[in-house]
Amino acid sequence: METKHIYLCDNSIDGIFTAIYLAWSSRYGHANIKIEEKSEGSKYANIELFSEYIAVDTDLELAFKVSASIKSKISEEAFEMSCRVALSDYLGKADLIYRFLILGFSIGRSIMEHMSNEVVNQFLRVNKNVSREAYHFIEFIRFSEQENKLLTAVIHPKSNVITLITPHFEDRFPQERFLIYDADRQLATFHVPGNPWILAHVPEIDQEGMDKISFVEDDYRDLWKIFFQNIVIKERINPKLQRGNLPLRFRKDMTEFKSK
Amino acid sequence: MVIQENMTVQRKLEILSDAAKYDVACTSSGVDRKGNGTSMGNSLACGICHSFSADGRCISLLKVLYTNECTYDCKYCINRSSNDIVRTSFTPAEISDLTMEFYRRNYIEGLFLSSGILISPNHTMELMIEALRLLREVHRFNGYIHCKAIPGADPVLIEMLGWYTDRLSVNLELPTAESLRDLAPHKSRKSILRPIRQIQLGRQNHRESLGLPDFGQKPLLTTSEADQDIREIITSGSTSVLTPFSKKKEKRFFVPAGQSTQMIIGATPESDYQIMSVAESLYQNFDLKRVFYSAFMNVNQDIRLPSTQAGPPLLREHRLYQADFLLRFYGFHTKELLDEKRPNFNVLLDPKCDWALRHLEVFPVEINRADHLTLLRVPGIGTNSAQRIIMARKSAVLDFADLKRMGIVLKRAVYFITCKGRMMYPIHIEEDFITRQLVALKDQPIPGIERDITYRQLSLFDDVNFKTEFRTISKIAGM
């Protein structure tokens, strides 16, 4: 039996793409290779016996080569999907992308049509989950106005969707300064009018600063709660349907579900 | 009538959102508009729901009335002039401020503005237009606005409204002219259809003047289904007085997201067949984007209207929406689903299953060969599934395991399809057998009504005209 070569890479798009480049050019044979992303938070994978672990240092140049060849040999769409899968919380996403690309590079842009293939199917499913979660956060994110007019929002997403949702708000609020903070990953995006938005790692957020809301903020929160309660038709109350449409995990960051 | 001066915005919002909640439409869909880099707002064609209220309905827009004062006395309406309730009005500034501040905080996708009739339709429309003008021109709001046009208002005012809004709608209220005369004596069917026609022609003219193809344009010949009023409105000369928008700099479209309408279900004795025929002829003749159905609730406890003690007719509403989707996305016609002999939908089966059981001669359908429209007619296969099947079968011959993997639900479909010429189980294709199997399915509860089905009290005055057919009952009895 051949030893399995396991590439252990950073949990990021660039990290995964670097590992894919190295794995591909190693010539160990696809069947003898596995790519594993470093675990995120409390999730972990078991160490496998009888296999050789290879640590991967993220190399932007190699990652860029991989993304360029996905775009030219498969499609722009496949590249975007690979990025979304790389941002997901699916365990084994790096290997999934690798398996998908093996097929993709041999079949070409029509790979998306091979939906009955197990790898493609799983890939599309993870991609869809991430897009759906990003869409949910576009819907359910709530901004608060700070004393200095800055809009702030805190989110706790399962997948790392912060970079997927910020462009929407940049387009929507071009004249606003806003900050979106992913409290689990300690990532923040920040937008200032006239400049492109930026992503930063913020290990310690100034919680006191975040709580300094402007003096009209409370009024509008109350008005929104009043609206939220009055729009209900009593004869049709149906918490199950509400839970299906708006799962509980989103509610802790939403104004209308927070008690004072 | 009590009109309180100096009411706080909180109190006004309380009253006027409470009064607006019975309007069904709260979608923010139909128009894709990028932000313009300077003013606030953009819009996505798929629409965005920002929250879900305790009744499970989506909250996408700030849904309020401009005023709940009303000179009309429609029997079904909470705001009718003969009701003794607290009356109030917003000011245009209050509405535009609320919208802007809610929008900034990502509470809402835009504004849904309706109104009672204050003094006259024209006067009310002028106030509403002023609120929208403030939003669009002073606050430079670029998000979504849905507005109700008030029947009987001057065509010029309706057109002005059309330039500010994304979607306009005029409520049809009730399916037939007779019911409307009985329950809403101040409204006439023609005064409702006239603005609908005006908006339709306005949209066509505007698209034509821009040289855009008109995807929605249907032949203006009326179908034989259309009733007298619709035929008259369609054949009378053009009523559109469209003038180009005065400010050339701003690229604005006339009602870009199209128009919708809404009907009250269960207040009057129309059958499902009548309701669906009206909806179908509205889609065909007026190029509507949506028809909404609203289960009647006797909010005024009016003894001349049916009682809704046992809850509003939600199942009936649900069946109508199912049929509505079959008309719009599945290539069905009302005549296939219902006819004079069986004018109401089956309580136990959805309209598509019901149709399939009466047309077993076209089944089973071969998944690897059937065309798109045939796939769409298989119970359990929706628009997404059909598309996925067509895409996947380009590269592989599909079997049942593949379908399952692709996330296609086989619970219903299994009785109607073959893969590679074989059914999943040896199934006897016989109407009674399949009916029993389908009725026994305990799958996901119908949204919004499962609560009523499990422990429902028997009522003599249950959903008007909505009875289980004898044939179906005997089938279940034989189960």
Image: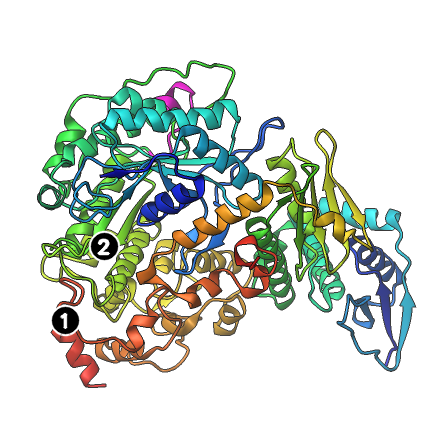
Could you tell whether B406 is left or right of B64 in the image? right
Q: Which secondary structure lies at badge 2? A: loop
Asked if residue A79 can be seen in this view, the reply is no
Q: Tell me where residue B348 sits by quadrant.
A: bottom left
Q: Is residue B95 magenta?
A: no
Question: Looking at the image, what colour scheme do you see?
Answer: rainbow
Amino acid type, callout 2: Val
Q: Residues within 10 Å of mark 2 (few under 14, many from 20)?
A: some
Taking A139 as reference, is A11 above or below it? below
Could you tell whether B365 is left or right of A165 in the image? left
Amino acid type, callout 1: Glu
Q: On residue B469, which mark appears?
A: 1
| Rendered location of residue B10, percent (x, y) | 44, 43
| Rendered location of residue A254, percent (x, y) | 57, 55
Q: Residues within 10 Å of mark 1 (few under 14, many from 20)?
A: some
Residue lying at 51% horizontally and 74% vertically, measured from the top left: B401
Q: Which secondary structure lies at badge 1? A: loop
**Magenta span covers which residues?**
B205-216
Provide the residue designation for mark 2: B299
Q: Tell me where residue B36 sits by quadrant.
A: top right
